[in-house]
Image (cartoon, rainbow, N blue to C red):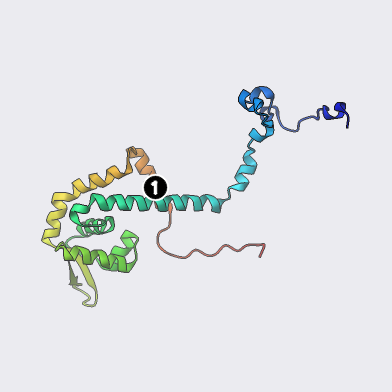
Amino acid sequence: MSNQMLSHSYPSTLPASRRVTEASIPSAAVHRGVHPKWLVVDPALQAAAETEDTSRFTAFMQLLRTAGALDRAATDALAELDLTAGAFGALLELANNHPTGIAPSELARRLSVARRTATLYVDILSRHGWAERNAHPDDRRMVLARLTPLGLQLVADLSEGYQRRLATLLGDLSPIQAERLRQLLSVIDVSGKQREPVSDPAL
C-alpha cells in the first residue's frame, strides 16, 4: 500500500465540537504515542454500558457499606448506655408514643426492622428498666410496650446530647445536604413488599 493511500484523509462524520485534533490532546499523551481516539469517551456508549440495574446495585452496595460503618460508629457513641443504634431508636420511638405505648409490630414497622428485632429492642430496654410491657386496655391479647418513669427520665436528661453525638457521625454535611439525603433515602421502599419480577423478552 502506498504512502499516498495511508496518508489519505477521509471526511469526519463527527461535528466540529466532537472532533479530536492534535492541538486538543495533552502534549504528554502525544509524546507517549497515545492514539487520539483512546482519549475520547462517547457519552452514548458510556450510558449504555452503565445500565439502570448496575447503577442501582452500585448505590445499594455503597449504602450497605455506609450503613454498616455508621452502625458501628453509633454503637461506640452509645457505649455508655450499652445500647445499639437500633435500641436507641426504639427508646425514642417509645418516648414519642408515651403514655399510650406501642405494639411491637408497629414499632417494627416504624423502625423498618423485623418483628423479632423490635421485640429484642424492647427486651434490651426492659433489662435496663427503661421499658415495660402491658396488656392493651381494649384487647388483652395485644401487648403494648411503653417507657417506665426511669426511661422517661433518661430521655429527658440524655437523649438530646446523644442525638447531637450521633448527628456528628454524618461529618460536615450541611443542613441542606442532610435534608436532601433524607429525601433521597425516603424514596426507597422499605416496606418489605416484594416487587413484581420484570419479565425478560429474551427468555
Q: Quarter-wise, where is residue 170 in the image?
A: top left
Horizontal and vertical percent for residue 99?
Answer: 16, 62
Quarter of the picture containing the C terminus is bottom right
Q: Quarter-wise, where is residue 107 in the image?
A: bottom left
In this view, 164 is above or below 36: below
At x 16%, y 50%, the residue is 158
Q: Residues within 10 Å of mark 1 (few under 14, many from 20)?
A: few
Quarter of the picture containing the N terminus is top right
Provide the residue designation for mark 1: 183
Seen from the viewer's position, the closer of residues 160 and 139 is: 160
In this view, 117 is above or below 179: below
Q: Would residue 178 be found to the left or right of residue 19 on screen?
A: left
Dot 1 amino acid type: Gln
Whether residue 100 is visible to the viewer of this picture, yes or no, is no
Give the total number of marks visible in the rendering.
1
Seen from the viewer's position, the closer of residues 134 and 139 is: 134
Horizontal and vertical percent for residue 40?
Answer: 65, 34
Q: Most extreme residue toward the front, as rendered?
A: 32
